[in-house]
Amino acid sequence: DAKTTQPTSMDCAEGRAANLPCNHSTISGNEYVYWYRQIHSQGPQYIIHGLKNNETNEMASLIITEDRKSSTLILPHATLRDTAVYYCIAASSGNTGKLIFGQGTTLQVKP
Amino acid sequence: NAGVTQTPKFRVLKTGQSMTLLCAQDMNHEYMYWYRQDPGMGLRLIHYSVGEGTTAKGEVPDGYNVSRLKKQNFLLGLESAAPSQTSVYFCASSQSGGSGELFFGEGSRLTVL
């Protein structure tokens, strides 16, 4: 699976959009981009995933560049409850689902 | 709908003792996983299972054994606990091994003295 690179930490003002970048320059054609988050010491929570096209759900939007070498997770209106560690993971569809988590980005939403 | 349930949530062991962590899921998922998370670190995959009766090694399998005798349960065993196994253990399950979502339990905090 491709290695991903994320900033260690980011701040965002409450109510503003949070844009979390992820670099996956060695991603291969059959690898999806997944985003999970972990609030405090809870179990990770799935947010969204995509292959080529941009994706949106009730939690967030995922923007993948045309060359698929990077992506951005967008939380449109960040709240204090969105403070968490966000993990970007690249994994192939045939990898039996096992995801390799890096250290992620710690997002601090400030009032 | 309980989702993924881990038992116990907290445990303190002495070096050399053995124990088993139980993960139970009620979503009829085929795939199950055990991860560990050390302070300030991301999750690392210990073992996983793609179906009842099957298990496979992940990134950090040494010192652990697993069993999947029933589809809904995935057991993680420590035969002789070591202080290096002090960690938070997370179980997860998914319906498919492809582009499916992983559902995680709330974690089991293990301390080995």
Image (cartoon, coloured by chain):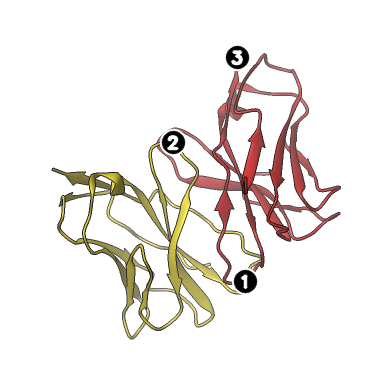
Chain colours: A yellow, B red
Q: Disc 2 to disc 3, how far (Cα)? A: 21 Å
How packed mark 1 is, by other alpha carbons closer than 10 Å (few <14, some 14-19, many 20 or more), is: some
Vertical relation: A3 (above or below) B93: below
Disc assigned to residue A41: 2
- Residue annotated with mark 1: B98
Quadrant containing the C terminus of chain B is top right
Sequence order check: which comes first, mark 1 or mark 3? 1
Q: Within 10 angstroms of label 2, few (less than 14), some, or many (20 or more) residues?
A: few
Q: Residue at x 60, y 28 (%)?
A: B9
The image quadrant that residue B51 belongs to is bottom right
Answer yes or no: are tags 1 and 3 on the same subunit.
yes
SS category of the residue bearing label 1: loop
Q: Chain of mark 2?
A: A
* Residue drawn at (29%, 45%) of the image: A81
Q: Secondary structure at mark 3?
A: loop
The chain under label 1 reads B
Q: Is residue B7 left or right of residue B42?
A: right
Residue type (three-letter) at the residue carrying disc 3: Leu
Which disc, if any, is residue B113?
Answer: 3
